[in-house]
Image (tube, rainbow, N blue to C red):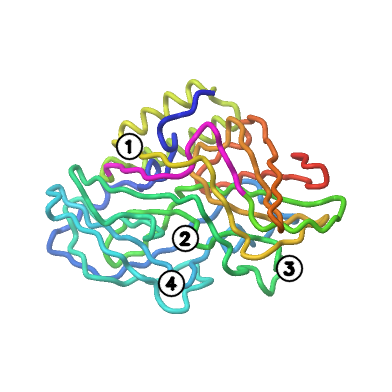
Amino acid sequence: MKKMKLFGMMCMASVLVMGFSSCKKDKTETTSSFEFNLPDIEGTSPFDDGKAYVDMVAGKLKWYENDKVMVYSLDEDIANSKAEIYSGEANMSGQTVTHFTGTPLQAGSIGYFAFYPAEKANKNITENNRASFNVGADQANSVDLFAGTNYAGRIFMDPKGVVCATTCDANVNGTMKHIFGFANVRLKDSGNSGKKVTSVSITDPNMHLTGSISVEIPGLTNEVLTGMKSLGQNYKNGSVNAVYYASTLRGYLDQIGYMSTPDGNTVTLDCGSSVVINNAYKFFLMPLRPGALKDGFTVTVNYEGGASEPISVPADKKYIVIPGTYTNISIDLANNQVL
């Protein structure tokens, strides 16, 4: 398939928003605090018993210590549009709802918009309230989010890799909405050879997974968000074909003024230390932009000592990445077989 020049058919900002039309504000209103809760994850659980920070037990996302959100106050006159970084409260790790505070923002005529994590967002707002966001190639498992549970030492992910956004009103709870889906590489070794994995990479040769994008935020509506997610679900279940999927998605992207600067096709999760793989699955979760993986991809397992093993996964609509949904990829390293 010809490589797509756009970074992400259904990329980060193409599903950023939850209906600005319901969030008009009086310009005299100012706020310095917001409260956000995180959404559930849908789809078939990737874990052995259907259970599992994300709290994978019950498919709940949880905030992580020192998390920050970028809050935009948008106005029809962009000279009055502003953005500030808001910090979560102390001891927020493990909470599904937390309080964020920052520099007071006067409400613009369009409303507020929040993006997580702040590190991926740009404060600069240009004509038509266009803002840009960036996705890097590296994710890092820095802490065992499941220490003290039955999944201790078995689930690996970057706690700051999740990407969410929402509109909100001042002093009212806002529920974040998923932007990325969750590619979950399940590794086991039925031969129990004790292979030691240091990192796992996913490469999509047909779509860029990293780079920067920009969108006209007010053009994003709840209808666009719902439509894009449903489009991915319908493609996965066979209700629509690839031609319809691509053309409909192109229409959504045009509505939001989507522009991109693509960078690369690979995302890598660094495990932090060597992970011994045996006959029980270990799970490597990488949040990825929607629309990826459907046309075939490669999982590369990197081992202690520098050896690596690329494993090709054939094109299959079941692997398409959908916002807030698990995409499960099971591999037996005894023969590098996709199960």
Q: Quadrant of residue 297?
A: top right
- Residue designated by label 1: 258
The amino acid type, in three-letter code, at marker 4 is Asn
Q: Nearer the viewer, residue 64 or 55?
A: 64
- Residue 38's mark? 2
Q: Could you tell which of marks 4 and 1 lies nearer the N-terminus?
A: 4
Query: Could you tell me how far apart the alpha carbons at marks 3 and 4 are, in whole angstroms?
Result: 26 Å
Give the class, few, some or many, for how many residues have Cα within 10 Å of label 4's Cα (few <14, many ≥20).
Answer: few
Q: Which residues are magenta?
A: 201-216
In the image, which is nearer the foreground, mark 3 or mark 4?
A: 4
Say which residue label 4 marks: 66
Q: Tell me whether circle 3 and circle 2 mark residues in contact (CB < 8 Å).
A: no
Please indicate whether residue 121 sits to the left or right of residue 326 in the image: left
Position above or below: 243 against 67: above
Separation (CA) of disc 3 from disc 2 = 23 Å
Helix, strand or loop under label 2: loop
Which residue shows up at 32% across the image and 37% down it?
A: 259
The answer to whether marks 2 and 4 mark residues whose Cβ atoms lie closer than 8 Å is no
From the image, tell me which residue sits under label 3.
150
Residue at x 27%, y 40% (from the top left corner): 219
The count of marks equals 4
The amino acid type of the residue labelled 2 equals Leu
Location of the N terminus by quadrant is top right
